[in-house]
Amino acid sequence: MEIKTDDYRIWYEPDTNAVYCQGSLRLSGMAEYAPIAELLDEVVDREPSQIVLDLQGLEFLNSSGISMLSKFVIKVRHKKTIHTIVRGSKAIPWQGKSLKNLQRLMPSLTLEWE
């Protein structure tokens, strides 16, 4: 599973149950984020024991994108059997505050910083 444009690339590696996000996500509204949300939903529907969401290469994410990630975290939280790790980069300003908010939605979520 992969979504690739000139601005960003998002892909899933089933061997490690990891979703990688790179580039800049400046899509307008949830409708434009739908393909990415569908990719994330497919990963959750596989019900792996662990999901890694690697955002270390995601330089920008707008409010609609943060909303999409929040919905993803809430969906995982409802499964109750999937351990979630979110990897971020302290070098990217938006990630510090926004990723901590994901942890508020799902206290068992593990944040790892580069």
Image: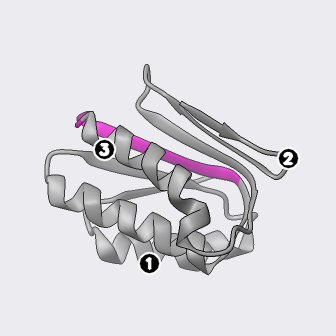
Q: How busy is the neighbourhood of tag 1: few (under 14 within 10 Å), some, or many (20 plus)?
A: some
> Which label belongs to residue 101?
1
SS for callout 2 = loop
Please tell me which residue lies in front, 50 or 111: 50
Q: Which residues are magenta?
A: 47-57
Disc 1 or 3, which lies upstream in sequence?
Answer: 3
Q: CA distance from mark 1 to mark 3?
A: 20 Å
Residue that numbered label 2 is attached to: 6
**Residue 112 falls left or right of residue 59:** left
Task: Identify the amino acid type marked 2.
Answer: Asp
Q: Is residue 109 above or below residue 27?
A: above
Mark 1 or 3: in front is 3
Q: Quadrant of residue 42?
A: top left
Residue that numbered label 3 is attached to: 44
Mark 1 or 2: in front is 2
Q: How busy is the neighbourhood of tag 3: few (under 14 within 10 Å), some, or many (20 plus)?
A: many
Residue 41 lies, in percent from the top left, at 36, 48
Going 14% across and 53% down the picture, which residue do you hit? 80
Disc 1 or 2, which lies upstream in sequence?
Answer: 2
Magenta stretch mostly in which secondary structure? strand
